[in-house]
Image (cartoon, helix red, strand yellow):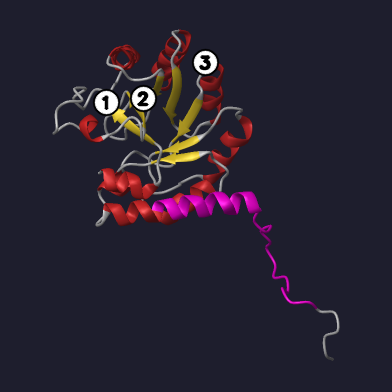
């Protein structure tokens, strides 16, 4: 796991508070292997199906020694793992008012993203496609629109399956990608992590460079000046 994280170049690692032991002395636990001086540990509320549960685990993480940052998840449907928007907004407002720095996992809906920003979220994390699906970026338009309208960072969370997905996602101008399953279920997680790093860097560089315009007709790419008759 640590080798894959290192190969990815990631500086932030999320920890599901509800699903792991918070005892850093247990060798079989994930926290034992993550050096907080090397990685920023971001607690998340994965597996919470109500605002009340999500807020309880966020507070538990803070009491257990995590920082004020929380990746907020409030799941609304067990099969698709899509968020419960009403519960998410409720928890986001409350936790932000309590001093948490809230990064909210959400769907790719612009209005929801705007409401989360208004609720005090420090970052909004729309999905590319359902968690663990590996389907890649299903709707580039919505992600671009969210990024263009929000003033807080936009980090795509969930659905990236391979390096080309990561590159296309970063080409939309987003600030980053959170991924797990694409690495964990790869044939070679360390090699895939390295590929994801290269793809993420390439996608960001392409976005900053600015792509050529799309056209519906062919345009000669070579000069016509001085062309032989």
Mark 3 closeness class: few <14, some 14–19, many ≥20 residues within 10 Å: some
Marks 3,1: beta carbons within 8 A: no
- In the rendered image, which residue does mark 3 sit on? 119
Q: Secondary structure at mark 2?
A: loop
Instruction: Please tell me which residue is depicted at 81% across the width and 79% down the height of the picture.
Output: 224
Mark 1 closeness class: few <14, some 14–19, many ≥20 residues within 10 Å: some
Give the farthest residue toward the front. Answer: 37
Among the two numbered marks 1 and 2 on one chain, the one whose residue lies closer to the N terminus? 1
Distance (Cα) linking label 1 and label 2:
8 Å
Within the magenta stretch, is there residue 198? yes
**Side of 93 relative to 26 (left or right):** right
Query: Based on the displayed image, in which of its 4 quarters is residue 48 positioned?
Result: top left
Instruction: Specify whether residue 18 is in view.
Output: yes
Q: Secondary structure at mark 3?
A: loop
- In the rendered image, which residue does mark 2 sit on? 73
Mark 2 closeness class: few <14, some 14–19, many ≥20 residues within 10 Å: many
Among the two numbered marks 3 and 2 on one chain, the one whose residue lies closer to the N terminus? 2
Instruction: Please tell me which residue is depicted at 43% across the width and 29% down the height of the picture.
Output: 106
**Side of 27 relative to 124 (left or right):** left
Instruction: Specify whether residue 133 is in view.
Output: no
Q: Position of residue 149 (x, y in %)?
A: 62, 31
Instruction: Please tell me which residue is depicted at 33% across the width and 20% down the height of the picture.
Output: 66
- In the rendered image, which residue does mark 1 sit on? 47
Q: Which mark is residue 37?
A: none
Near-viewer residue (25 or 212): 25
Distance (Cα) linking label 3 and label 1:
22 Å
Q: Position of residue 136 (x, y in %)?
A: 41, 49
Marks 1,2: beta carbons within 8 A: yes
Distance (Cα) linking label 3 and label 2:
15 Å
Magenta stretch: give its range: 196-223
Q: Position of residue 42 (x, y in %)?
A: 36, 27
* In this view, 145 is above or below 192: above
């Amino acid at each position: 796991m640590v080798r894959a994280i290192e190969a990815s170049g990631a500086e932030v690692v999320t920890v599901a508070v509800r699903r792991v032991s918070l005892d850093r002395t247990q060798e079989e636990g994930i926290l034992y292997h993550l050096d907080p001086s090397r990685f920023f540990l971001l607690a998340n509320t994965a597996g919470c199906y109500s605002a009340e549960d999500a807020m309880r685990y966020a507070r538990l993480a803070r009491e257990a020694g995590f920082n004020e940052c929380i990746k907020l998840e409030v799941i609304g449907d067990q099969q698709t793992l899509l968020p419960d928007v009403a519960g998410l907004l409720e928890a986001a407002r409350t936790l932000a008012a309590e001093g948490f720095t809230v990064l909210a996992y959400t769907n790719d809906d612009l209005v929801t993203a705007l409401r989360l920003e208004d609720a005090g979220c420090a970052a909004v994390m729309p999905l590319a496609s359902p968690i663990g699906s590996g389907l890649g970026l299903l709707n580039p338009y919505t992600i671009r629109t969210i990024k263009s309208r929000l003033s807080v960072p936009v980090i795509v969370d969930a659905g990236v399956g391979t390096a080309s997905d990561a590159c296309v996602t970063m080409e939309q101008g987003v600030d980053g990608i959170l991924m797990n399953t694409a690495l964990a279920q790869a044939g070679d997680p360390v090699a895939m992590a390295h590929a994801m790093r290269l793809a993420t860097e390439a996608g960001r560089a392409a976005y900053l460079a600015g792509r050529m315009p799309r056209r519906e007709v062919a345009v000669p790419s070579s000069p016509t000046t001085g062309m032989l008759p």
